[in-house]
Image (tube, grey):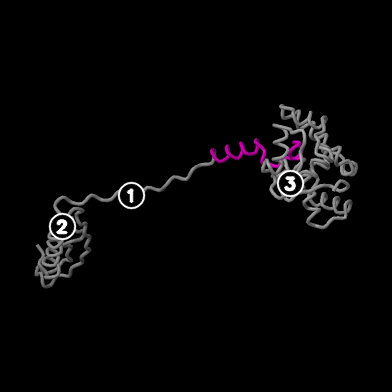
Amino acid sequence: MADKHPYTSGANGVVSAIAHLRKSFPAKVNAETLKKLGIAPNNETYIINILRFLGIIDAEGNKDLKAASVLVQHDESEFQKGFAGIVQASYKDLFDLYGAEAWTASPDKLISFFRNTDHTSDIVGRRQASTFQTLATIAGMLDGQPSRAATTKAKKADSAAPKKQATKAPPAKPASASGAQPPAGFGDVNPGTGNSGDMALTVRIEINLPVGGDRETYDNIFKSIRENLLNGKVS
């Protein structure tokens, strides 16, 4: 792997390894070290190859003092600046071709470069490109997260948007204390001779039942309607 660009199947192993070395850099780093730390299980050798490619450790796993001086930088901007220098020096052929644009080159450009340079398969070329982009993100040269400004702007837009208010249901009509209200149109009679047998009735019935009424109350209401309407007894 020393003569080819390194790769790994995911970004977590690389990110975890660099993060740990920034906190504590052992005198010797090898696959056994990563295994004890629980970093990149079953992929330890891939991470070691990346660290060697970057010159952070040598072939025996000994730390490089110059690289170590970058990793111990507490200030994030100073660390990113130094780490970007390490990455750029290690990927010299890529930067010779694309210059500073290599940091933000599209995945397709990176895959094409790595496959043609190392004669790798499609899947390896994709992992080589992904590994480079992970390193570029750690160096602060490629933003892998939504920008803080964009997130703040989106939150402000959400808070400024008018909120839809729930439609209130119309209040229910209060029930009559004495039972059913007099039905509208009840007893409306077309003019006639005065004889109830000759009358033509037009009746519209509206019943508002009391909320707390029992069965006897309801029976009395319908009994009254039956006696006064259906039997033709109009007061």
Residue 138, given in percent of the width and then of the height, sits at 74, 38
Q: Nearer the viewer, residue 232 or 84?
A: 84
Query: Disc 1 residue type?
Result: Pro
Q: CA distance from mark 3 to mark 1?
A: 68 Å
**Quick one: which residue is furthest to the bottom in this view?**
197
Q: Residue at x 19, y 54 (%)?
A: 210
| Residue tagged 2 | 214
| Residue tagged 3 | 44
Query: Disc 3 residue type?
Result: Glu
Disc with the residue nearer the chain's start (3 vs 2): 3
Q: Quadrant of the C terminus?
A: bottom left
Q: Residue at x 21, y 59 (%)?
A: 207
User: Measured along the vertical axis of the image, is residue 200 above or below residue 123?
Assistant: below
| Residue tagged 1 | 170
User: Measured along the vertical axis of the image, is residue 112 above or below residue 56?
Assistant: below
Disc with the residue nearer the chain's start (3 vs 1): 3
Disc 1 is placed on an element classified as: loop
Disc with the residue nearer the chain's start (2 vs 1): 1
Residue 215, given in percent of the width and then of the height, sits at 15, 60
Report if the CB atoms under discs 3 and 1 are less than 8 Å apart: no
Disc 2 is placed on an element classified as: loop
